[in-house]
Image (tube, grey):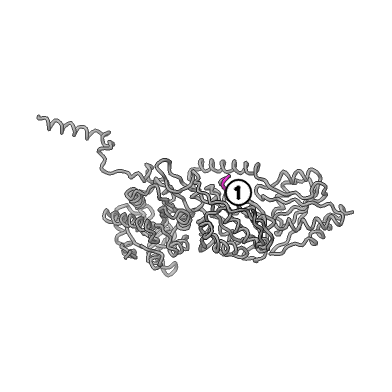
Amino acid sequence: MRELRLMKGNEALAEAAIRAGCDAYFGYPITPQSEILEYLSLYATERTGMVVLQAESEIASINMVYGAAGCGKKVMTSSSSPGISLMQEGISYIACAELPCLLVNVMRGGPGLGTIQPSQSDYFQSVKGGGHGDYHLIVLAPSTVQEMVDFVPISFDLAFKWRNPVMIVADGALGQMMEKVELFEQMPRSSTVPEWATVGKPKTRERNIITSLNLEAEKMEEHNLKLQKKYKQIEEQEVRYESINCDDADIVLVAFGLVARICMKAAELARDKGLKVGVFRPITLYPYPFKQINKLAKEGKRFFVVEMNAGQMLYDVKLAVNGLSEVAFHGRMGGMIPSPEEIVEKLEKQYQEAVI
Amino acid sequence: MNEKTMTEDHHYQQMIEEESICLQENLVYERPETLTDAAFHYCPGCGHGVAHRIIAEAIAELGIQEDVIGVAPVGCSVLAYNYFNIDMQEAAHGRASAVATGIKRVLPDKYVFSYQGDGDLAAIGTGETIHTCNRGENILIVFINNGIYGMTGGQMAPTTLNGMKTTTSPFGRDVSLVGAPLKITELVAQLPGVYYATRQAVNTPLNVRRAKKAIVNSFEYQKHKKGLCFVEIVSNCPSNWKMSPVEANKWLEENMLQYYPLGDIKAPH
C-alpha cells in the first residue's frame, strides 16, 4: 500500500531517492536545499546501504558523481544556484562522457550570492548549456511536493535510458514547503552492471574507458554528431507538459514549476472575471514542448508568460509561437514570488481590449 | 666438426636471423599484459613511461588486473588510459582524487588509483587532494613531480624550484612573489587518514626498483583497507627543462632531489 505523509519538498525528494534505490549521493550544504543531504545522512545508509558523502565543495561533489556514475551506479547530487554554477565544468564532462545521473537544483535568487529566497533564474543555465560545449541535460520541473517525489524514479529511468544526466529544477519554495505526499514503495537497489561501466576489466572483454577527451578533431566531431542524434531522439520522445483549460481559452498563461500553480489560481480568478484563460505548463524544460505551444498559437491564442526571473523561458515560448501570436511577460526577481492577483492585474492591463 | 658444434652453429645462425628476435622464446623482457601495445607519446627520456610501466608491472604481479580501476589526470599523462590495459576514467583537471573517491565509495572492494602531475594535484586540485587524503580514502595516489607544466609547454608549477626558469618565470622563480615550491607530500603526510607517504624517483635502475616496491606495497595496504597511500615520484621533463635526457637526470639529482629528498615520509609501523 502507498504511504501518505506530510513532508517538506526537500525531504520528500530525499525520501524518494532512497526508495528509488539510489546507490550514492555526494553533496555540499547550501540553503535552501541542505535538508536533502541532512535527510539522507540520517536515514539512507541504514535503510538501503546507500553511500552518502558530504564533500568538501560542489566541485568535488560533481566529480565524485562522475566517478561513481562511471561505475554504472545510480548516483545523484543536489545543490542550489551558486553551487550548481560551481558544478558546471563537471556537468559538461558528464554529458560528454554520457554518464547517467540525477542532479537537483533547488533554485535561489541570483546573480552572485543573491538571496536564499526562491527563484527560477537558472532556466538558461539548465536548459541552454551552463557548462562549455554542445550538450543538453534532460530537465524536469516539478510544481508540487508530490512531483518532487514522483520525478526522482522517472529521472533515474531517463538517465539510464539515454545515458544522459537529468536535472530536476525546483525552487526554494518547493524545497521548503510542506504538502501531503503519496510515497511509492521501496525499490531494490540494482545489481545490474552496464556493459560500459568501469568496474575492473575481466579477461572476457576489452577495457572500458570513461572519458570526454578526443584529440582527433574528426573523432570528436563524430562524437558530437552522435550526441546531437541522441538529443534529437530525446526531443521526439520525451516531451512532457500539462495543459489546463486551454481548449476554449483566448489567453494562455505559460509557466513552469511553482509559478504554474500560481498561474492556475490566477486563471481561476480571471475566469471569474469573464476572461477565458488557460494554463500551459512545460514539465520537461528540455526537451521543450515547442510543437504543442506552436499548435496553440495556430489556434489564435495569445500568450502570457510568467516566471520568477527576467524572462528566460520567454525566449522558448517566442520561438515556439514564431510570430504567429502575441507573447507578453510578467516576471519577479531576486527571490520575490508573484501572487495570483498580481498576475491577473498584469493580464488585464495587457489584454484590456480582449476584456472589452 | 662434431655433432655438438654443428648444433651450436645451427643455433647461432638462427639467433642472428632478424625475425628470430621477435620469437617468444627468445624474449628476455616483456610488456606486461597490463599495458596495451600502444607506443607511449611521451618525449624521449621522460619519466612518465617508466612510472607507467612499474604501475602496470605491480598490477600484473599482484594479479589484480580484473579488480583495478585507474583515474587519469589532465596534463601530459591525460592519455594514460591509452596505455594501461585496465578499466580507467579520465578526470577533469585536478579532480582525479574526487573521481577516485566516487569510484571507491561505490566499489569498496576494488583497487583504485589516481595518477596525477604537480599542476593537477598540487595547484588546481589541492583542495581535492587534501580532503581525499584527510578522509583516508582507501586509494593510491601516484604523484608525478617534475616541477613544471609539461603539456601546456613549460609553465611554472607549484613545485618549480626557487630560481628555476620556466616560460612564466622567465627570470627564475621568485619566492618573494609566488611563494616557495610546495612540498605537498610532507603536507599530506601530517593527516591521520594517510597511511603511507613516500617520495621516490625513476632516474636510476635502483630508484626504479624502489619506486615499484612502493607501488606494490601501496596496493597491498589498500587490500587491507589501511588508508590512503601517497607515492610521489620525482621525475624530469627534458623537453621543457630544455636539456638532453642525460642532462635532465643529472640536474634532477643535483637540484630536485636536494629540495625533494627521497625516502618514506610516513611509513607504516
Can residue A255 be seen?
A: yes
Magenta segment main secondary structure: helix
| Residue A204 at x, y percent in the picture | 41, 40
Left or right: residue B114 compared with residue A282: left
- Counting the numbered discs, the total is 1
| Residue A124 at x, y percent in the picture | 65, 54
> Does residue A157 show up magenta in the picture?
yes
Left or right: residue A26 compared with residue A319: left
The chain to which mark 1 is attached is: A
- A152 or A239: nearer the eye? A152
Among all residues in the image, which is located at the extreme front?
A: A1
* Residue B265 higher or lower than B71, as above or below: below
Among all residues in the image, which is located at the extreme bottom?
A: B176
Q: Quadrant of the C terminus of chain A?
A: bottom right
Write down the region rendered in magenta: A153-162
| Residue A237 at x, y percent in the picture | 65, 42
* Residue B266 higher or lower than B55, as above or below: below
Classify 10 Å Cα crowding around label 1: few (below 14), some (14-19), many (20 and above): many
- B68 or A49: nearer the eye? A49
Residue B30, by quadrant, is top left
Can residue B45 be seen?
A: no
> Does residue B43 show up magenta in the picture?
no
Left or right: residue B210 compared with residue A344: left
Which residue corresponds to mark 1? A136
Tell me the residue at 52%/48% (across/down).
Answer: A97
| Residue A212 at x, y percent in the picture | 50, 48
Please, what secondary structure does the residue beneath circle 1 have? loop
Residue B121, by quadrant, is bottom left
Among all residues in the image, which is located at the extreme left?
A: B1
- B172 or A247: nearer the eye? A247
* Residue B5 higher or lower than A2, as above or below: above
Look at label 1 and name its amino acid. Answer: His
